[in-house]
Image: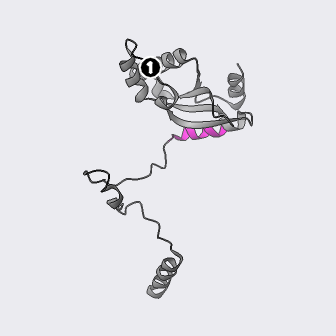
Amino acid sequence: MELLHRLIKLLMRVLGLRPASHPADPVDSTATKSCTSVPLPPVRINNRFITESEQRFYHTLVRCLPTEQTVFVQVALNRLFWMPGQAAGAKVWQNKIDRRSVDFVVCHYQTLQPLLAIELDDQSHRLEKRQQRDREVEAIFHASGLRLLRVPTTCTPEELRSLLHT
């Protein structure tokens, strides 16, 4: 077994390959030493950056969209919106935009122009704090003119198709 292990290591070195790091292995932070004086703590990939219900809905949504449309998930609002000038309240609202995201953004396939956003409403949207956040997000979308579609997690493909075409 030891011989096999050494042969694999030698072959990888000859081919210029590096072994994949295990999630528990520390990350080599030498690349960050030149950009900051603060050492980089361990960084891990979040393999579940969307919930299971969002993942199921994503697959349903993709099947319901025409071929000239594509979808992005967990889009930060500050990638969609900006506030020109120094209008009253702009800093407060920009702060809200900077800290929020929307579950899905449907875009034109070639231009990537946003066409509409979708917020999947699960049970967390029943909480008062979440409802306040939802009202603020709805106000931002309304002010921008970009359509925000709120969809319950129980939405069927037929219901979704109907909602997308209204």
Does residue 69 belong to the magenta stretch? no
Residue drawn at x 43%, y 25% as measured from the top left: 97
From the top left corner, tell me how far across and down residue 4 is, in percent.
Answer: 49, 85
| Magenta stretch, residue numbers | 50-60
Asked if residue 140 is positioned above or below residue 45 in the image, the reply reads: above
Residue of label 1: 131
From the top left corner, tell me how far across and down residue 3 is, in percent.
Answer: 46, 88
| Observer-nearest of 124 and 107 | 107
Does residue 58 belong to the magenta stretch? yes
**Quadrant where the image shows the C terminus:** top right
- The extreme bottom residue here reads 3
| Observer-nearest of 57 and 14 | 14
**Which SS class for mark 1?**
helix
From the top left corner, tell me how far across and down residue 76 is, in percent.
Answer: 48, 33
Horizontal arrangement in the rendering, residue 151 relative to residue 36 (left or right): right
Q: Could you classify mark 1 by the number of other residues whose Cα lies within 10 Å: few (under 14), some (14-19), or many (20 or more)?
A: few
Q: State whether the magenta stretch is mostly helix, strand or loop.
A: helix
Which image quadrant for residue 96? top left
Amino acid under disc 1: Gln
Residue drawn at x 67%, y 38% as measured from the top left: 62
Residue drawn at x 55%, y 37% as measured from the top left: 73
Horizontal arrangement in the rendering, residue 153 relative to residue 124 (left or right): right
Asked if residue 23 is positioned above or below residue 110 in the image, the reply reads: below
From the top left corner, tell me how far across and down residue 132 is, in percent.
Answer: 42, 18
Horizontal arrangement in the rendering, residue 54 relative to residue 2 (left or right): right
Asked if residue 110 is positioned above or below residue 26 in the image, the reply reads: above
Residue drawn at x 33%, y 55% as measured from the top left: 32
